[in-house]
Image (tube, rainbow, N blue to C red):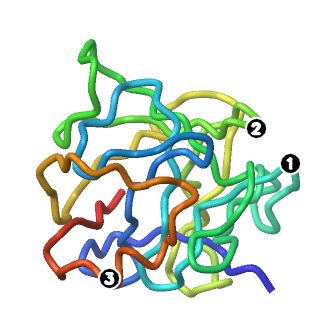
Amino acid sequence: MVPSVTGTPNADDVNSYWQVRGDIRSDCERGAPIKCDSVIRLYHVTTHRNLHSHNYPSPLSNNQEVSAYGEEGVGDEGDRWKVVCTTKNDYWLRKDPIRLQHVVTGKYLHLTGDTYGRPIHGQKEISCYAYANSQNLWKVDAGVYVRQSSEPLSSTRDENYNAQSSKNDHFDDEL
């Protein structure tokens, strides 16, 4: 079973933390600013899976399903998200809202306006939606930010490198 992805207004929820990682097709310099229109992956810190979507209907809203997929950060093309900036900046800034556009399907990561009794009572479904609107704007609320490193983290390197790094070496941005 693939875990579902839901939204909660509680920013302190341990399940709200995602680590920004580089695209599967290129290296990522740890701490480097993220350029608008870059392709990234989002790694869920608690489940060790990637934010994922595919052209399959979500069970609640019938939008496109979003799930947590892969093991220890290893996934597939469905884990790729384009950072769509909503300002005229060249880079994604913490204070600015962004959209995340699924590379494979072109749809936007979206928060439904409905609260369902399942899969988790009181939480909102996260899905992908065909059009940009106010329900698919995301902003970093909390996290650990690091300075740029001169050593690239390769997409082919052992993803367990993070566990070997010091606790404050890099980390998790909440969307």
User: In the image, 162: left or right of 140?
Assistant: right
> Which percent across, then down, holds residue 81?
57, 42
> Which percent across, then down, holds residue 117?
64, 84
Which residue in the structure is indicated by mark 3? 13
Amino acid at the residue labelled 3: Asp
Q: Earlier in the sequence, mark 1 or mark 2?
A: 1
Viewer-proximal residue, 20 or 151?
151
In the image, is residue 6 above or below residue 13?
A: above
Residue at point 54% right, 40% down?
A: 26
Gap in angstroms between the C-alphas marked 1 and 2: 9 Å
Which residue in the structure is indicated by mark 1? 55
Residue at point 45% right, 34% down?
A: 83
User: In the image, 2: left or right of 37?
Assistant: right
Label 1 neighbourhood size at 10 Å, few (<14), some (14-19), many (20+)?
some
Label 3 neighbourhood size at 10 Å, few (<14), some (14-19), many (20+)?
few
Q: Do residues under tags 3 and 2 come within 8 Å of each other at their CB atoms?
A: no
Secondary structure beneath dot 1 equals: strand
Amino acid at the residue labelled 1: Asn
The numbered dot on residue 104 is 2
User: In the image, 146: left or right of 15?
Assistant: left
Of badges 3 and 2, the one in the foreground is 2
Secondary structure beneath dot 2 equals: loop
Amino acid at the residue labelled 2: Val
Of badges 1 and 2, the one in the foreground is 2
Q: Do residues under tags 1 and 2 come within 8 Å of each other at their CB atoms?
A: yes
Q: Do residues under tags 1 and 3 come within 8 Å of each other at their CB atoms?
A: no
> Which percent across, then down, holds residue 100?
51, 40
Label 2 neighbourhood size at 10 Å, few (<14), some (14-19), many (20+)?
some
Gap in angstroms between the C-alphas marked 3 and 2: 29 Å
In the image, is residue 109 above or below residue 175?
A: above
Secondary structure beneath dot 3 equals: loop
Q: Earlier in the sequence, mark 1 or mark 3?
A: 3
